Image (cartoon, helix red, strand yellow):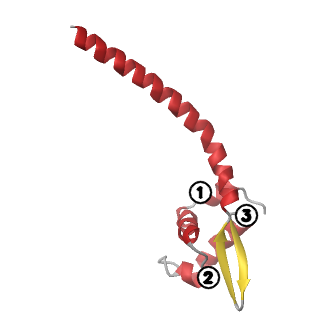
Amino acid sequence: MRRDIFQAIADPTRRAIITIIALQAMTPNAIAENFNTSRQAVSKHLRILTECDIVKQEQQGREIYYTLDIEKMKEIDIWLDQFRQIWETRFNQLDDVLSKLKNEKNEK
């Protein structure tokens, strides 16, 4: 089953894994040490992140290291950007209203 990036980041554990491996490549065992869960549960999360192309696997000797694909994360940023623009417009409108109210109060 092909998942999308938003399904991948919907889970708090997967978001935590993304945060951990954003700093450095790690093995599944090293990642699992950061959680109070089984190695198998972490492997399931890593599989989902890999299916969504958020993380990449790299074989180094006998170990597999997981790294974050920062380019794939840009897809989330692009999607969020449309909301940033809306929020920015609304905050600017709020600033205008507050400035107007402040000026009216000072005139009294």
Which mark is first along the chain, 3 or 1?
1
User: In the drawing, what numbered circle is on residue 53?
Assistant: 3
Which mark is first along the chain, 2 or 3?
2
Give the class, few, some or many, for how many residues have Cα within 10 Å of label 3's Cα (few <14, many ≥20).
many
Amino acid identity at mark 3: Asp
User: Does residue 38 show up?
Assistant: no
Q: In the depicted view, which residue is nearer to us: 90 or 23?
A: 23
Residue pictured at 49% horizontal, 77% vertical: 34
The residue carrying mark 2 is 27
Amino acid identity at mark 2: Thr
Q: Residue placed farthest to the top in the image?
A: 108
Give the class, few, some or many, for how many residues have Cα within 10 Å of label 2's Cα (few <14, many ≥20).
some
Is 56 above or below relative to 83? below
Is 49 above or below relative to 75? below
User: In the drawing, what numbered circle is on residue 10?
Assistant: 1
Q: Position of residue 86 (x, y in %)?
A: 56, 31
Residue pictured at 61% horizontal, 76% vertical: 25
Residue pictured at 60% horizontal, 43% vertical: 80
Q: Position of residue 12 (x, y in %)?
A: 53, 62
Q: Position of residue 90 (x, y in %)?
A: 49, 27
Is 58 above or below relative to 18? below
Which mark is first along the chain, 1 or 2?
1
Nearer to us of marks 2 and 1 is 2
The alpha-carbon separation of the residues under discs 1 and 3 comes to 15 Å
SS category of the residue bearing label 2: loop
